[in-house]
Image: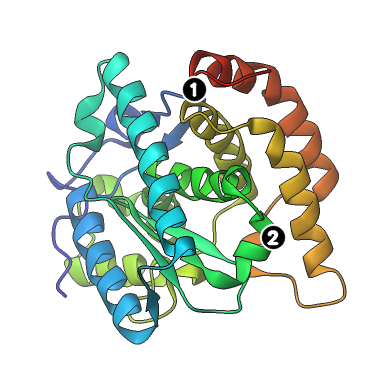
Amino acid sequence: MKVTHLLGMGAIALSAVACTTNPITGRSSLQLANNSEILTMSSQEYRTTLSKGKVITGTADAKRVVNVGNRIKNAAERYYQSIGRSADLASYSWEFNLLQSNELNAWCMPGGKVAVYTGILPVTKDDNGLAVVMGHEVSHALAGHGNERISQAMVAQYGGAILGGTISNSQWASVFQKVYPIGSQVALLKYGRGQESEADEMGLYLMSMAGYDPRAAIPFWNRMEAASTGARQPEFLSTHPNPETRISDINKDLPKALEYYKAAGGKL
């Protein structure tokens, strides 16, 4: 696919228009790339991944993935509507699929294309645990972490040339495809630790807004760490903060998450 106009209008002053603020966490990030291009390529990659794998449908587990995903999606849409930012999600085309794989993994493409691997279900155990995973992965998409990674790569590789508008379409395409390798496993996209921490926090709030108990997050992450002991670390954990830091951060975020959970009808 030819990638065109990744910077939209051409030369863009980084300090003037590239800063995006996450409405849930308040974190600001550099997002230069054109989201419509990202969504188009993400949708193509999702279709390719599904065609190469085995999609599980009609089972209790497959229905759980869809049900939990839809509740988190609905919670996100309600929240964004409440703060007047429904337009942020207008181009999303949500999908939730369960894929047959022994990997302890799950991911969400920009635009709401979610895949959960069967290998992680014994670790999630129940709907609350599954909501931890899916809330975390949906948060990567909502926070624009893919755009941020692309933007970081652009600046690192081309620096001031971005401001001069001298970067060709082929150069932008090269950067894009290094961050989102077309035709490869989507899970190979590497998020930074700051992004993973933000997805932990944001996901905790989203699952709580959806009526899932955020107190399930700590037991889930402990099970994930235990499941990876003595084996190659799962992709799902490869760039996360260390376990102690993650648990400490979750404990700090739990009071706010529990407020969302109570507002959604949860019992404390």
Q: Secondary structure at mark 2?
A: helix
- Percent coordinates x, y for residue 54 in the rendering: 39, 82
Q: Which residue is mark 1?
A: 26
Q: Is residue 239 visible?
A: no
Image x and y of residue 236, in percent: 62, 62
Q: Is residue 103 above or below residue 23?
A: below
Residue at the image point whose x is 46% and y is 31% from the top: 210
Please tell me which residue lies in front, 90 or 143.
90
Q: Element under label 1?
A: loop
Percent x, y for residue 25? 52, 25
Residue positioned 62% across, 50% down in the render = 126
For the C terminus, the quadrant is: top right
Q: Earlier in the sequence, mark 2 or mark 1?
A: 1
Q: Give the CA distance from mark 2 to mark 1.
A: 31 Å
For disc 1, the neighbor class at 10 Å (few under 14, some 14 to 19, many from 20) is: few
Residue that sits furthest to the bottom in the current view: 52
In this image, 230 relative to 24: left or right? Answer: right
- Which of the labelled discs sits on residue 123, or is there none? 2
